[in-house]
Image (cartoon, rainbow, N blue to C red):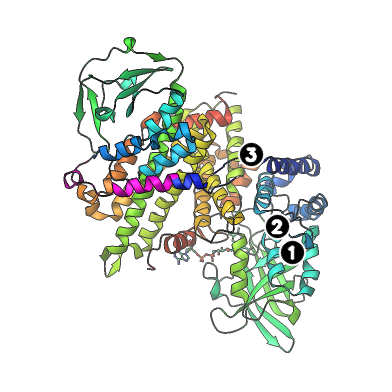
Amino acid sequence: MDYALSEEQAALVAAVQGIVRDHGAPPSDARQSFAYFDASLQAALQGGGFLDAARVLGALEAALVVMEAATAPGAAELGASALVAPHLFPSAAPNGPFALIDAAALGKAHRHLPIAKTALITDGGDVLVLDLNGVRIDPVDSVYAYVYGRFAERIDLRALPRIPDAAPLLRQWHRVALAAEMAGAAAQAVAFTVEYVKTRHVFAKPVGAFQAVQHRLVQCHQAALAMRYLTLKAAWAGDAYHAALAACFAQQKASKIVFDLHQFNGAMGITNAHLLHFWTYRLRALQAEAGGVYASAHTVANALWGGAGP
Amino acid sequence: MEFGWSQAQENYRERIRAALRELLPADWHETYTPQSYASDAQIEFSRKFCPQLAERGLLVRHWPKEWGGEGGDDWEQFILAEEMKVAGEPRGPQYMNVNWIGPTLMRFATPEQREKYLPGIARGTTIWCQGFSEPGAGTDLAALRTKAERIGDRYRINGSKIWTSYARKADMCFLLARTGAGRKEITVLLVPMATMGVSVTSNPGLCKDGHLNEVFFTDVDVAIDARLGEEGQGWAIVTHALSFERTGVPRYHVGIEVLGLAIAQLKAEGRADDPIVRARAGMIAAQFEAARALTYLVVDQRVKRAPENTDANVARITALDAVVELMNFLVEFTPDCLAGGDAQLEEYYRINVPAGVTAGTYELQLDLIAQRGLGLPRG
Ligand SMILES: Cc1cc2nc3c(=O)[nH]c(=O)nc-3n(C[C@H](O)[C@H](O)[C@H](O)COP(=O)(O)OP(=O)(O)OC[C@H]3O[C@@H](n4cnc5c(N)ncnc54)[C@H](O)[C@@H]3O)c2cc1C
């Protein structure tokens, strides 16, 4: 048991932090937007090989990359590239960024679809691979802080290359990926709010001096910290149980974090220009992915106590 | 970063489990655990059990060799705590002796005091109680009023302590008393419970028997060598002592076990396939695992002697949240456990009723994290 980062891991984290710092100030038009896809952040992470960390170093390192990169105000496609694709395609992966899609919801809006190069479509127990080159996508407006899009043409699933029985593996790493993004976004949203409540004064005191604020803010910090370590453990363990634990915890805590942090930022927190929503509405976006909290809870229950019945 | 146990740690855990299999009587879970670790029955049992644990080198393994330990690290102490807690804490109150009373004596006691008290703890034969709280001093401990008046080379103690777990059966009291008017003019006295003028009464309550005692000190006369450290050093000693308890009890381990017991009951009743039951249980398990992950973070920091921070407080409230959810699960899905049903589930529920109050309340933890961890201004 060793919770400290190795030298190599610390260097990796520091490098990603450096990139995030360089992308810390969104351009003025992006500041007013709901979702800001930071193409430059995506290019820096991809070009620097950071999203290949799972192949070169390991899944734990990939989770560290995703977590750190998720603290940036701009969104990039992190988790699917860094954690899902390397496990689905151990040797040659199709081109990222990826959109993760459930065939049953094919006609709905999908996260990252407008910027993705490949869609991985879960179809029953299998995964289908769709090269998005030339596929027409309509952007979809959303308050979720990622770019969303919908297919503007019919997709014939039968014609797509199929990876048999790969859906459980995809779901497992999708859970680790979303938990890692949630951990990063939650930590950043808490840090952002802690700073805000130190500076904003009401009744001649900083907002953060009131115990009613302090206690709930601590609970948000607590959730973010626990998300971090459950996620890292899930990446390290590499099994469906730990992945489900991480997702289940992150997804059950999202609602509280989003509500409380917006409360403490007052009306300012609901304006786009304040930036808080970039992190909180990423939490919201991920709350229902990979089956959502109840599906991950069922995976946990099945692993601990077996199938139902006497 | 590494989240697995070493082979040596696995072996150590297996050694403890083997000792438990060997030493606990066949009716342990039926007869003893439902009464809880503070009950008279379990305290008496601990007087037999702890010496046997000590013989196997498993009672104070984390202590220095000089005092009967093997210099084991914090992980070993923690693995022991996990296994004992999940077994129903057969050490009774003696977990407290080995975790913080002994180590505090090593640090502050005179050589004579160490000779007098440490062997009894290391052999597992002495029961201690902790005399801190008073009717008018709980969270605000420095408001305590029990007075120790210096008369020549003796102290005369008058006052009362409350919620003194194990007091009815204890041999010794680790007592905090006021030796001056200043808020922190407090001194630690090591008082034999058999001293004339010490009396104990007990009250019934929601948590299982053994905790809700009141201890009265009426003109209790002890020699000056009952004092630990200097006069007025009590506050510093207690702060140091409590730092050993920073991580708290490993609640996640037993929490997941109890969740499993409840699921087993629901399976037997044909109700375990209810998707709501399974979803709630899975969510609670995730909360306990979150507490485990944070607790291990804290133990790791301690092993590495990292500077103190508030992660331990965070780990504690995370465990408390999970406990509260589990108590609620029991009431929602196995409500008979509080009305003549499964005694182990009842014990779990009742022993945890005060979990947010003991050893630093939930709110106090939140305050500490807010101010020391997040750097928020005092209100
Ligand atoms: C089962 C059990 C076993 C115990 N065993 C022992 C023992 O062996 N020895 C011993 O000395 N004591 C023992 N205690 C006592 C325990 O340490 C105290 O109960 C605890 O310190 C809280 O004190 P209190 O009960 O007086 O609550 P109070 O201090 O009266 O607090 C009441 C409420 O007010 C809140 N509060 C207090 N201050 C603040 C603040 N500044 N901001 C916000 N909220 C605040 C508290 O969090 C709590 O919710 C035991 C208690 C229990 C329940």
Q: Amino acid at mark 1?
A: Ala
Furthest residue to the bottom? B152
Question: Which chain hosts label 3?
Answer: B
Circle 3 packing at 10 Å, graded few (<14), some (14-19), many (20+), is some
* Residue B86 on the magenta span: no
Where residue B211 sits: x, y (%)?
65, 59
Magenta residues? A12-34
**Closer-to-camera residue (A35/B38):** A35
Q: Amino acid at mark 2?
A: Pro
**Is the C-beta separation of discs 1 and 2 under 8 Å?**
yes
Where residue A200 sits: x, y (%)?
27, 63
Q: Quadrant of the C terminus of chain B?
A: bottom left
Furthest residue to the top? A158
Q: Quadrant of the N terminus of chain B?
A: top right
Label 1: element kind: loop
Q: Give me the residue at 71% from left, 88% from top.
A: B151
Residue topped by disc 1: B170
Question: Which chain hosts label 1?
Answer: B
**Mark earlier in primary sequence (3, 2):** 2
Mark 3, mark 2: which one is toward the viewer?
A: 2
> Could you tell me if residue B332 is visible in this image?
no
Magenta-drawn stretch, dominant element (helix, strand or loop) = helix
> Which label is found at residue B342?
3
- Report the image quarter containing ligand 1: bottom right
In the displayed structure image, the side of residue B94 where residue B206 appears, left or right: left
Residue topped by disc 2: B93
Question: How far is mark 3 from mark 2, CA to CA?
Answer: 24 Å
Q: Give me the residue at 23% from left, 24% from top.
A: A150
**Closer-to-camera residue (A128/A91):** A91
Label 3: element kind: loop
**Closer-to-camera residue (A23/B128):** A23
